[in-house]
Amino acid sequence: MAFKAVKRPANRSDISVYSRPGPGGGAVCKFFQQGKCTKIECRFSHVVAPTPLTNPRALVRTREETITRRDKNIDSIVTQKAVATPKRMPGQQSMATQKSIVTQKSLANKNSIATQKSIVTQQSIPTQKSIATQKNNAILKPLEKVCKFWANGKCMKGDRCPYLHSWFRGDGFSMLAKLQDHKKTVTGIVLPEGSSKLYSASKDGTVRVWDCRTGHCGSVINLGGEAGCLFSKGPWVFAGAPNVVEAWNIQTNAEFSLSAPAAQVHAMEVGNEMLFAGTQEGIILVWKDGPEDNPFQLAAPLEGHTGAVVCLKVEADRLYSGSVDHTIRAWDLNMLQSIMTLNAHSDVVTSLICWGQFLISCSLDCTIKVWAEKGNLEATYTHTQEHGLLGLSGVADAEAKPVLLCSCKDNSVWLYELPSFAERGRLFAKEEVGAIQVGPGGLFFSGDGTGLLSVWKWVEPGLKVESS
């Protein structure tokens, strides 16, 4: 029987294991390459294949041969020069020896430098990848964004979810309660002195009165229009609405409606026995103290702003006002005249507070500015955020350290330690936080665009805080 020999090609290329068919067709997961794949059983490969045309062993062998040949050439040159070297005085080294020593030192230095560069490169590569991941991957800071599915009670990933399953991040404080009855954005929160009632105002046109012991809403006051702000001083509670300021005395139960013929009232303050109200028309209304039957006497308004006045702050004998016209004005409370205009912000000045001898302002221009008296007020420090700022409030933590609360347009409140501006944590919300307020005993409050009022409290150092 005759057999026919078949000659197989000798140069047939081997098939790489990375090219074998399998789940996903052997393709590498593009999300894995970008650091974004969160699937446990991904149908694509999570292995980076080497280049098929490159043989690592051949590269290593070639490099070793190159180094060996280089060393042999150097030895050969040194030997030849040493044979041809003339006689020398005792103690004198030959030029070949000197060159050999120099060459060896040079090679040693080169090797050490190469090693150092290699070490630096190896150490810097993860950092660069980390930076690239942070810029390109939305899961860069997994604890900086609340999981929207968890917020609605629908997240099924549990501990595998890359997003935050808590309404706050940080140590030293916790959430005590959630009060949800308002239908629209909370615009003001106050806890009057000596009262066990918490008051909140909203754009739904109501002021709600909450029992601090039970957390239940005991009564609702209808303003007849959108509430622009809420303020309290002593036994008085004031609510700003379109063309009117409603006033209640919680001790005597007296009620007054103060006519405000300047559209919506956005901000209120009390100083030097006068009530001030910032309005949409850019003027500041003034009421002076009067007799018991009519304790609020309308006086001449303060004019100067060219846009709505949205924040007010009294300190010593001055009133500070922030406006949509991007400016801050300082007013003398004795003369009721503007004495200074500050122009450092480039957008709406949304909030003002005083801390010691400093004035602190924030704006939709994404900055917080600290002002100090140097003849005139000057901005001595600027802190920049990624988003516009809506409100400020100052509070002392459980160790009596000053902390600044900053409401931002990213639906969160940032906590910064003063004066360093070191971050202490964040509070998160479903929508923008329109009101933040401080209460006694380490309490502080936040109200967001959904109408939710959250109650927070500083806890004693060392106590474990549970997420909620």
Image (spheres, grey):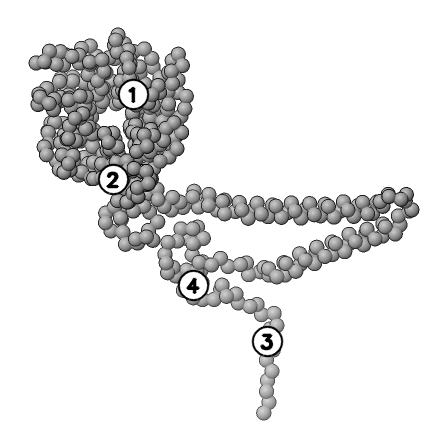
Q: Going from the N terminus, do you reach mark 3 or mark 2 first?
A: 3
Mark 1: few, some, or many residues within 10 Å (few <14, many ≥20)?
Answer: many
Q: Nearer the viewer, mark 1 or mark 4?
A: 1
Q: Which mark is residue 25?
A: 4
Between disc 3 and disc 2, the foreground one is: 2
Q: Secondary structure at mark 1?
A: strand
135 relative position to 9: left or right: left
Q: Which residue is mark 2?
A: 175
| As drawn, 466 above or below 296 | below
Q: Earlier in the sequence, mark 1 or mark 4?
A: 4
Residue visible at 11% across and 27% down?
Answer: 224
Residue at the farthest right position: 87
Residue positioned 41% across, 60% down in the render: 44
Q: Which residue is mark 3?
A: 8
Label 3 element class: loop
Mark earlier in primary sequence (1, 3): 3
**46 w.r.t. 429: above or below:** below
Q: Secondary structure at mark 2?
A: strand
Residues marked 2 and 4 touching at CB (< 8 Å): no
1 and 3 marks in contact (CB < 8 Å)? no
**Does residue 103 show up?**
yes
Q: CA distance from mark 2 to mark 1?
A: 31 Å
- Residue at 18 percent across and 25 percent down: it is 193
Cα–Cα span, label 1 and label 4: 62 Å
Horizontally, is 208 left or right of 154 in the view?
A: left
Left/right placement of residue 211 relative to residue 168 reads: left
Left or right: residue 90 compared with residue 411: right
- Find disc 1 in the rendering and name its residue: 322
Residue 428 visible from this viewpoint: no
Q: Amino acid at mark 3?
A: Arg
Residue 403 placement: quadrant: top left
Amino acid type shown at disc 1: Gly
